[in-house]
Image (cartoon, coloured by chain):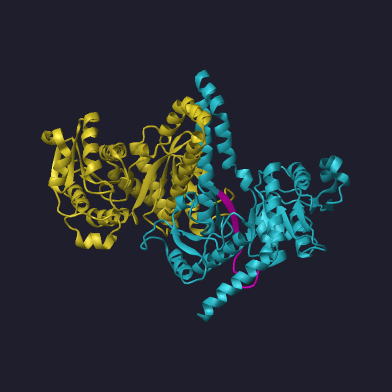
Chain colours: A yellow, B cyan
């Protein structure tokens, strides 16, 4: 941990669609709720200062100047080569140097992944990094990985994702009883379905000490009974985005229905408390903050369009991961599970 | 077309979770709405007769006895070899023999696909059959394929799916302006993302005469602006099932919210007309009936758990496909597009 027992988190203050306009207020708000952390705002000093206001004297809120920014559509390779003083790169450098225990960026996922992998390096025995996040389900929430870091995965990769996901969730999620229940995403519960990688991963997981409960189908992510759902990054990303699409469509139809005429508007008014409660329950902002797993350090990706509340949630996830030394735990977990397998 | 201009549809009366209990009433109801079709109920005569009631004298409703049934979890290869007199197989045989213009089954998808492929054979130049269905979207509905017939697809397969989907939609969907807008499912709109097959399929589609609009992400299925979304069967199935899961979760939370206490129950009562209207809009029963494309004949797969209303919808889709000679159109479309490519 950096310097003292206090957790220090580096924030890419220029990343995302809104940059410092969201990141700086989120940092200020977060310190009000959790006074015991230190935050480093990385980016152009004059811009950050312009958003600090009264908080500029707070010693828990430091500015670390960085002259460049990574664009949201910039090629990862270009960002890596050409932007050595970008707010994103410097935030990750601070983790590498031990100045920060974790970093958060709402910037371009590809560039963040490439840069984090280059600067921090992978944990031993981990072949690929993976992206994981929690999403709401009927009985609480479900963690899903990978969400887009890897488009083609072998059974071995899927197995490693399962180990990493299991360790992360055991470390940071108090609401889930250990050991987390692991499911493998497939297109049918019968043994006959699925592609080769998935079938092989099923064998590896069945033979492991993980709390593996077998195949789950797409709807299983939302219907409870599983804590971590493992899949490749293409499928995971499509599943997540499709679900976002459905939620948006449903929201649109509900809004449209209640707006139709005076009577339905009144009905909407009466139903408001219920609709708001429901909305809060599946509010994607409450789930903002995806962890990049498999790296020697904690890197959290915030949604590019995150608002202040959503970005604060990403900071919270970074703090939890740093406090619980997630990278160390994952390294130990991977070593344990892979060694057990080779010695079996 | 069988015998006369009247469309004849063979129904697997024993398939699905409910068998004749759902299929026979659906057939009777369907004839009330669309008197101009003939339906053949395939399965065990005594069982079917038990559900016919007053309709048993209707000449448009014939029974074709079949002694066997395919179980919902039966291996496709086993069904194909061992169940030559199953209701599913005989319904498909009737299409092959020209006795029926289309068939509908709520049975096991794998067995239906394997049997249909074996009996009817593929259309020339089509490598793989694909499963397509329409699902609700913000501006109407979107057709998605493949939904599970193919777990590993090459770029060429994806291209053929696009051609088949385009032809089907042009033939049967009056609400969509021709030529249908085709999108390719991917995990980012930037050119840098996606796997190799998807990138190559993008090239093939971009060079074709199809109305190809480029990549769409998972949420794009529901947000309008595209008519046919093409992907492989693993991804398509997961996207569809995930979306079903989200819809169920949202339904659960809404119901729970309105049931909490007397006040919320009253609010629910007031909001009921809006909630019902909304429910009807995304009612999966209204979208029941997936087409198996690429075969020399029309085969429609109903959801296994379909109720009477849902199964009627599958019959409707079969009728539309048969009336519009979808298989012929797809054969012509594939020939046209593939020849254009090789001659280019």
The answer to which of A116 and B268 lies nearer the viewer is: B268
Q: Give the residue furthest to the front.
A: A262
Position of B336 relative to B68 (above/below): below
Q: Give the residue furthest to the right.
A: B57
Q: How many marks?
A: 0
The answer to which of B248 and B268 lies nearer the viewer is: B268
Q: Is residue B126 magenta?
A: yes
Position of A315 relative to A236 (above/below): above
Q: Residue at x 51, y 51 (%)?
A: B238
Residue B258 can be seen, yes or no:
yes
* Residue A53 x, y percent position in the rendering: 15, 36
* Residue B134 x, y percent position in the rendering: 58, 52
Q: Is residue A35 magenta?
A: no
Question: Where, quadrant-wise, is the N terminus of chain A in this rendering?
Answer: top left
* Residue A164 x, y percent position in the rendering: 36, 47
- Give the magenta part as a residue range: B123-135
Residue A344 can be seen, yes or no:
no
- A69 left or right of B208? left
Q: Quadrant of residue B280?
A: top right
* Residue A212 x, y percent position in the rendering: 47, 44
Q: Give the residue furthest to the top.
A: B262
Q: Residue at x 23, y 42 (%)?
A: A21
């Amino acid at each position: 941990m950096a310097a003292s027992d206090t957790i220090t988190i580096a924030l890419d203050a220029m990343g995302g669609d809104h940059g410092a306009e969201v990141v700086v207020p989120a940092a200020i708000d977060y310190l009000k709720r959790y006074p015991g952390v230190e935050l480093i705002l990385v980016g152009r000093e004059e811009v950050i200062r312009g958003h600090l206001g009264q908080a500029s004297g707070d010693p828990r809120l430091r500015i670390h100047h960085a002259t460049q920014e990574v664009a949201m559509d910039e090629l990862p390779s270009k960002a890596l080569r050409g932007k050595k003083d970008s707010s994103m790169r410097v935030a990750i450098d601070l983790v590498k140097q031990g100045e920060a225990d974790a970093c958060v960026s709402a910037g371009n996922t590809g560039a963040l992944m490439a840069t984090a992998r280059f600067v921090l390096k992978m944990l031993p025995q981990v072949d690929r990094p993976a992206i994981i996040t929690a999403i709401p389900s009927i009985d609480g929430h479900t963690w899903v990985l990978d969400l887009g870091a890897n488009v083609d995965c072998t059974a071995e990769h899927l197995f490693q994702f399962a180990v990493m996901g299991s360790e992360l969730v055991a470390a940071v999620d108090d609401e889930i009883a250990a050991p987390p229940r692991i499911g493998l995403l497939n297109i049918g519960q019968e043994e006959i379905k699925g592609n080769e990688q998935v079938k092989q991963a099923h064998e590896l997981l069945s033979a492991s000490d993980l709390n593996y409960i077998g195949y789950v189908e797409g709807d299983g992510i939302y219907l409870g009974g599983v804590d971590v759902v493992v899949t490749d990054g293409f499928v995971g990303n499509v599943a997540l985005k499709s679900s976002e699409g459905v939620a948006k469509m449903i929201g649109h139809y509900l809004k449209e229905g209640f707006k139709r005429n005076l009577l339905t508007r009144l009905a909407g008014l009466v139903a408001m408390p219920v609709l708001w409660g429901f909305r809060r329950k599946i509010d994607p902002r409450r789930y903002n903050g995806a962890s990049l797993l498999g790296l020697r350090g904690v890197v959290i990706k915030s949604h590019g369009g995150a608002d202040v509340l959503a970005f604060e949630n990403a900071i919270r996830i970074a703090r939890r991961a740093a406090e619980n030394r997630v990278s160390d735990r994952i390294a130990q977990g991977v070593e344990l599970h892979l060694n057990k397998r080779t010695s079996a």
